[in-house]
């Protein structure tokens, strides 16, 4: 069993000081929890995108800063998104953003 973990003062902007690493071109990741479900921060540079993918489990996203877009719309700071298993979309950020993301299972890239 994993030990509990706490990040003091995560909000309103304590997350901004977390160390990130490359994930996709223009997108960085900071893994907060691994072992299913996984939790991370994703930071998109302006204009960055993630290819079309299919969710194999529930994905939950909270936009912490900027805006993130997908095939259904544009979501600004404070938006909470749920992408259920079987759903598909592309993701991008026109102006850059940071999101808190939780996923049950890795996605399957289809583009």
Image (cartoon, rainbow, N blue to C red):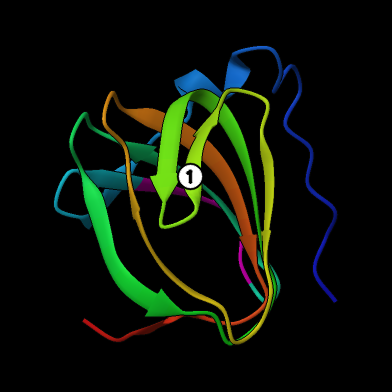
Asked whether residue 10 is drawn in magenta, I would say no
The image shows residue 109, relative to residue 59, as above or below, that is below
Residue on which disc 1 sits: 73
Q: Position of residue 30 (x, y in %)?
A: 45, 46
Please state which of residues 15 and 60 is positioned toward the viewer in this rendering. Answer: 60
Left or right position of 14 against 29? right
Left or right position of 31 against 85? left
- What kind of secondary structure does the magenta stretch mostly adopt? strand
Which residue is drawn at the image coordinates 78% and 47% (left, top)? 5
Please state which of residues 78 and 42 is positioned toward the viewer in this rendering. Answer: 78
Q: Position of residue 87 (x, y in %)?
A: 56, 78
Which residue is drawn at the image coordinates 38% and 48% (left, top)? 29
The image shows residue 39, relative to residue 76, as above or below, that is below
Quadrant of residue 82 within the rendered picture: bottom right
Asked whether residue 30 is drawn in magenta, I would say yes
Which residue is drawn at the image coordinates 70% and 72% (left, top)? 37
Quadrant of residue 24 within the rendered picture: bottom left
The C terminus lies in quadrant: bottom left
The span picked out in magenta is: 29-34
Residue at the top extreme, as displayed: 12
The image shows residue 35, relative to residue 66, as above or below, that is below
Residue at the left extreme, as displayed: 25
Q: Tell me the element at label 1.
A: strand
Q: Position of residue 89 (x, y in %)?
A: 42, 68
Q: Position of residue 58 (x, y in %)?
A: 70, 73
The N terminus lies in quadrant: bottom right
The image shows residue 32, relative to residue 110, as above or below, that is above
Which residue is drawn at the image coordinates 43% and 38% (left, top)? 68
């Amino acid at each position: 069993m994993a030990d509990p973990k706490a990040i003091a003062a995560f909000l309103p902007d304590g997350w901004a000081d977390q160390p990130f690493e490359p994930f996709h071109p223009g997108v960085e990741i900071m893994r907060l929890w691994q072992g299913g479900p996984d939790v991370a921060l994703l930071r998109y540079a302006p204009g960055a995108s993630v290819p079309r993918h299919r969710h194999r489990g529930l994905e939950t996203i909270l936009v912490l800063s900027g805006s993130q877009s997908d095939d259904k719309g544009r979501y600004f700071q404070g938006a909470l998104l749920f992408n259920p298993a079987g759903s598909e979309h592309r993701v991008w950020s026109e102006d850059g953003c940071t999101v808190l993301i939780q996923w049950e299972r890795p996605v399957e890239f289809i583009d």
